[in-house]
Amino acid sequence: MILDEVQTLPRKFLNPLLSAMRGLAKDWDTTFLFCTATQPAFERSEQSGASDPRWPAGEVREVIRNAPQHFQSLQRVSVEWELKKPLPWPELAKRMLHSRQALAIVNLRDHAMTLFSAIRTQAPGHPGVFHLSTRMCAAHRLSKLADIRTRLLAKEPCAVASTQLIEAGVDLDFPAVFRALAPLDSIVQAAGRCDREGALTAALGSPGGKLTVFCTEDGKTPPHEYREATDITSAMAKAAPLSIHDPEIMARYFHRYYGEASATSLGLEIEQARNKACFQDVADQFRMIADYTQDVFVPWDAESRALIQELDTIGLITAELRHKLQRYVIGLSPGEFIRAKRAALRQIRDTGLWVCIDGLYKDDLGIMIEPDPASMVV
């Protein structure tokens, strides 16, 4: 079994996941192959006790020999940690525009919108300014990514304000990347968008990409494990120079993250349900990616508008229609959904299906949770 792009696992799922993997390895002769630049520390550290749910030292084997040497020889990015004081959005926008081609990855959708606005204010009418977040439907994001890729290949100016959605599985190559302080593995993934093809490094004979890690003025991040992992990264970076090219640093980070999760009660309810073969309970409790959002269909292009019109006409959603609309759906958090219902959404009869009102889905930003006051002035 191959597990690609392994990143921070919520701590409460560590015990049941490792237990399930041990069962597969022992009873079903399964071998797990982890493919990632941010390998989690699935083995116990020297300081952890028997209650630590991870494997004993020596059971996880490195496939690549001399991994530290490969990390060093394949460097394409230099990292600057600017954590002593926050970087204001206007200053970040200025630095991105000065870099000509730059990507900034932030932790919150509101931050992405704020940064995009700051860039656009400093470069009005600039065709190479982009915003990416999950307030845009999948079809919309793919279209924007294609435009961004075209500008990058043509060496044209390009400034992108994005959430974490761009960190993994997106093949883009920027000379400069700015990353809001985040879990260390997320920062490493952000570095993967910087001099991705290695052309700058080959020309210079040294790492040609530049990654800048910065603090936002409000310091906000997603809550719970993401916040805790971010705090661990911050503490490590402030205590000593932090290199993303040293696998030992990544191991230390994960040991700190999972080392605080060694209590035997960790994931106990999930493990008990699994042992009793109550698999529906396991499915309900084991959510590696928590999703409590409300789906909303959005009118982005002619096809999506025609599909929404069909939905209006028949008053229900068929399997075929849902499949076609999947590219035009976004998820709103409970708070966002409550705000959006006031003016941005309408319900399809009494079906529980919600649609963004035409005119409140923008080509640059996606859904407008609340109408722009300027647009209400006659």
Image (cartoon, grey):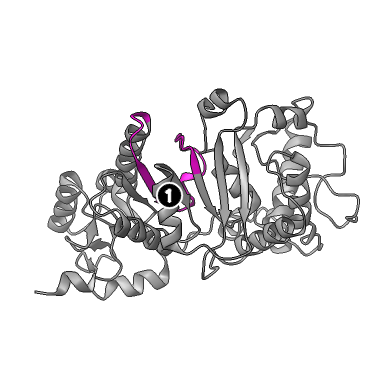
Q: Quadrant of the C terminus?
A: bottom left
Toward which corner of the image does residue 331 lie, by quadrant? bottom left
Asked whether residue 107 is drawn in magenta, I would say: no
Residue 269 in the figure: left or right of residue 173: right
Residue at position x 72%, y 57% in the image: 271
**Of 70 and 27, the residue lying toward us:** 70
Residue at position x 52%, y 29% in the image: 200
**Of 122 and 22, the residue lying toward us:** 122
Residue 156 visible in this rendered orientation of the protein = yes
x, y percentage for residue 154?
33, 29
The residue at which mark 1 appears reads as: 96
Residue at position x 29%, y 53% in the image: 123
**Of 125 and 57, the residue lying toward us:** 125
Q: Secondary structure at mark 1?
A: helix
Residue 304 in the figure: left or right of residue 156: left
x, y percentage for residue 348?
21, 64
x, y percentage for residue 357?
19, 63
Residue at position x 37%, y 34% in the image: 152
Q: How many marks?
A: 1
Extent of the magenta region: 153-176
